Image: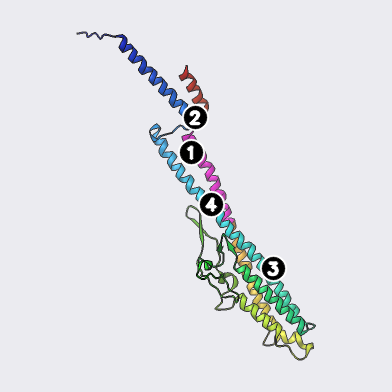
Amino acid sequence: MVTAFRTTEGVIASKTMDNLQMSMLAMQTLQDKLSSGKEIRTPSDNPSGAVAAMSFRSDQKRTEQYSRNAQDGLGWLGTADNTLTSGLDTIQRVRALILQGANATADPAARAALAQEVKTAKDSLLGLANTTYLNRPIFAGTANPAAQIPPVDTYDSVGTYNGNTGGVFRSVGPSASVQVNFDGPSVWGDPAVDDLWKTLDDIQTHLSSGLPSDQNKLTAAYLSGPTSMQSDIDRLDARSLNLQNRLSEIGARYHRVEQMQSRAEDSLLTLSSSLSEVENIDLPKTIVALQLQQT
């Protein structure tokens, strides 16, 4: 049995309109892609591609945070490096003052002046010990003495430590965390044993008191007597050596953080390229498709 369908002008017009609407929709889709530059505008355009793009974006954000952490870590370590380098220069100046004070030609007035210069050096070193980076003390551990009520320095005027021995860490990569600070006692000495401030106080005392009556025996008395200047030099050299060791550690950590930052930047380039391949349109191909659709 054959069934005949009647084709009317209304049917023809309806079909024509449907086809035109489909053609216009296809053109609009191509124009949207061309104007946005994106192949995937909604997850329904390409579900698997949308999932891949989300994963790439997540990795990208994480890597950007690693790069920012590394830059912050470099700031901490660079500040510490400059501070300790300046501290070493000041300690070497104090050492020279001790040698001048131990000289037999140094009279009481000259040695008193040397003692005053050592006091000035101590004040300078205390200023270095209170160095901050972005308003955070770099030698106070995880403490922030400036936020206390009332606020205090990491080291007060007599060398009392107001921080702790906590470590400040920065995550610079997957499973990679680097300590970017040094607590005060590890740098300037343990106050319970012998720190730099006690050494400097003793040097001032030895320079300004205990002069032997025979000026010709001044050097021998100070190098071998109870107020031995040689002992002061040895203690000062120990503090200087400790600062040099800390500087070596800073250099090693700085190098590692720099490497991790470079690796993060390389990863960002790779992720951006991968995301572009998934999301972005093929421009020549899209232009040709639009021209064909217009035709």
**Does label 4 or label 1 sit earlier along the sequence?**
4
Q: Helix or strand or loop: what does disc 1 sit on?
A: helix
Circle 2: is it few (<14), some (14-19), or many (20+) Cα within 10 Å?
few
Numbered mark located on residue 89 in the image: 3
* As drawn, 95 above or below 107: above
Residue interval drawn in magenta: 255-281
Q: Amino acid at mark 1?
A: Leu
Furthest residue toward left:
1
Q: Helix or strand or loop: what does disc 3 sit on?
A: helix
Numbered mark located on residue 275 in the image: 1
| Residue underneath mark 2 | 35
| Residue underneath mark 4 | 68
**Does label 3 or label 4 sit earlier along the sequence?**
4
Q: Is 280 part of what is drawn in magenta?
A: yes
Q: Is 263 part of what is drawn in magenta?
A: yes
Q: Amino acid at mark 3?
A: Asp
In-image side of 213 versus 295 (left or right):
right
Q: Which mark's residue is nearer the viewer, 4 or 2?
A: 2
* As drawn, 230 above or below 185: below
Q: CA distance from mark 4 to mark 1?
A: 21 Å
In which quadrant of the rendered view does residue 238 lie?
bottom right
Give the camera-side residue of 25 and 251: 25
